[in-house]
Amino acid sequence: MKSESVTQAKKQPDMIEPLFDLILSALILATALAAVTGRQVFRSVIFFIVYGVLIAMAWLRLGALDVALVEAAIGAGLTGVLLLGALGRLKHLGQISATSLSIWFRVAMAFSAAGVSLGISWAFITLPEPVGLQAAVNTQLTIAGVENPVTAVLLNFRAWDTLLESVVLLVALIGVWSLAQNEDWGMRAGLTTHSPSDEVLTSFAQILPPVGLLVGVYLVWAGSSQPGGAFQGGTVLAAMALLIVMAGLMAPPRVGSTAVRLIVVLGPAVFLAVALTGALSGQFLTLPPAMAKALILGIELFLMLSIAATLMLLVLGPPESKAKQ
Amino acid sequence: MITSAMIFGLCGAAVIGIGLYGFVIHRNLLRRVLAFNVIGSGIFLLFGAMGYRSPILGADPVPQALIITGIVVALSATALAVALVVAYARATGQSTLPEDGAEHKTEDKADER
Amino acid sequence: MIGLNNILIFDLLTYGLTSLGLLFFLAGTVGIQRFPNTHSRLHALTKADNLGLGLIVLGLIFQADGWVTVAKLILIWILALLAAGISSQLVARVALPDAVRLKGNEIRERHPSKKTTRHD
């Protein structure tokens, strides 16, 4: 799909692509520097979001479209929202102190960091010739059940990593919830504020979520043959839910409710169940080639629901009633 | 020999250095979480560039799957770290860790027990 | 449009329209640098970027390999338009000075001593 357009673009001189990569890399370095050394924390976070989008473009240039989707959605989008929310809460608590260190310390640290970079670059340049796993994956792709090699690796060949990853999301959520105060346990997630509803945001939160729902489910469905997958689709759904909560159209869910806990656990539980039934017919977590596609899509559907709920709850944070004086 | 992989690999290495500098320089915990994310994405960029080094074979899907897992896990860690920073700020009123040997006084909510 | 990727006139149209779109992006960026306050910068940003993106999408349509791709490109433009419009509205409302807030259709004067600091 992409290789045809690349061969047609070969009538351009062969300098355009490296030039584009160089400019993109320069932009990436500039935004990373601005994100790290911004004078105000708000400015740093905004530059970090821009940096995330530029990294997603770099993933496109490296032929990793699934990673580009995940980076744009999670790396730039959700992480930026998380940091902005934390910034708001720290300002709400009244503390955003930033002490500065001496100039010589900064110069010494800059040189050390540059030394680390140079060491890593040298290690990268002197790597031996690649013996990638593309051939191995491509020969096994027919029995994997899906045509997208990244989905095949994620949900079939290295399904163990993905199972543990879904459990890690769950553990992080439990960790975030357990930071609530005693009296807030089981209450609605996130900081309860009484901000006036904005009509613009409300109408936006009524127009966009149906489209977002369609796009999210399509991403999961199309992930079997095109770039996409459960993580990308689940993140879009989480973003839509966050938009609805932020516009005030829906109260954030109670962390003590059984329905919420069921949805959050459902994805890893279904994944684990499929893995254990694989153990009955052979090894743990093997998918029989006849049913591989159906199993993968089934796992991805429940994983999408769990990922959406978990990501939304992670961004909302622990339940917190209004700060006491 | 200037391929996409080479350029982005070196860019990733430079980003790791930038993130490391930002992590060491700042005392504010939220900035450190941000620098940690920059380091993480630099590592992913380096790893992904390693997977694209042979243009004949195309992109290697195994590093891409590992990177997707890594991005999601980095988000989970960031969410937990951010919740910890906010809880710490709520308890002590500071957004930086104390110096060695000193301790921040926690606002005692014990007398409300 | 399937299989017409090598026609010269389509390529020329793509070059022309995307260059024009990039010019609009450049104008918007210059506007951000040169305008004095938030609202005029927002004005430059959204007007120039929306039209610039529309021109770029129009240029890319001539390189598409099917009507489905054209539909997807137009959907992308509509979503970007929606997001840019909404977010610029929200930023503009937050950036209003404290004495004036729009509530429904009326403009109410708030007590000028209630100041919220917006700088770090």
Image: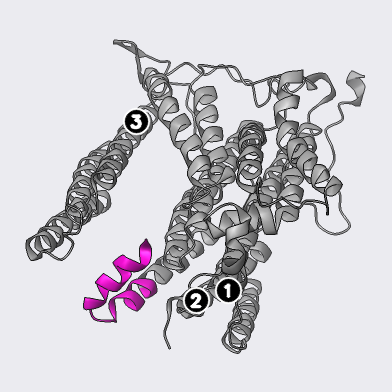
Residue A303 located left or right of residue A42: right
Residue range (magenta): A1-22
Helix, strand or loop under label 2: loop
| Principal secondary structure, stretch drawn in magenta | helix
Q: Is the Cβ of the residue at disc 1 closer than 8 Å to that at disc 2?
A: yes
Q: Please state which of residues A37 and B15 is positioned toward the viewer in this rendering.
A: B15
Outermost residue on the left side: it is C9
Q: Please state which of residues A310 and C8 is positioned toward the viewer in this rendering.
A: C8
**Quadrant location, the N terminus of chain A:** bottom left
**Quadrant location, the C terminus of chain A:** top right
10 Å neighbourhood of mark 1: few (<14), some, or many (≥20)?
A: few
Q: Please state which of residues A105 and A251 is positioned toward the viewer in this rendering.
A: A251
Q: Which residue is mark 1?
A: A135
Residue B35 visible somewhere in the drawing: no
- Kindly report the distance in space between the C-alpha atoms of the residues bearing marks 1 and 2: 8 Å
Question: Do pointers 1 and 3 mark residues of a single chain?
Answer: no
| Amino acid at pointer 1 | Ala
Horizontal and vertical percent position of residue A20: 33, 71
- Kindly report the distance in space between the C-alpha atoms of the residues bearing marks 2 and 3: 44 Å
Q: Which residue is mark 3?
A: C86
The residue that appears at 40% across and 30% down in the rendered structure is A211
Check residue B57 in the rendering and tell me which mark sits there, or answer none.
2
Residue C27 located within the stretch drawn in magenta: no
The chain letter for the residue carrying disc 3 is C
Residue A205 located left or right of residue C21: right
The chain letter for the residue carrying disc 2 is B
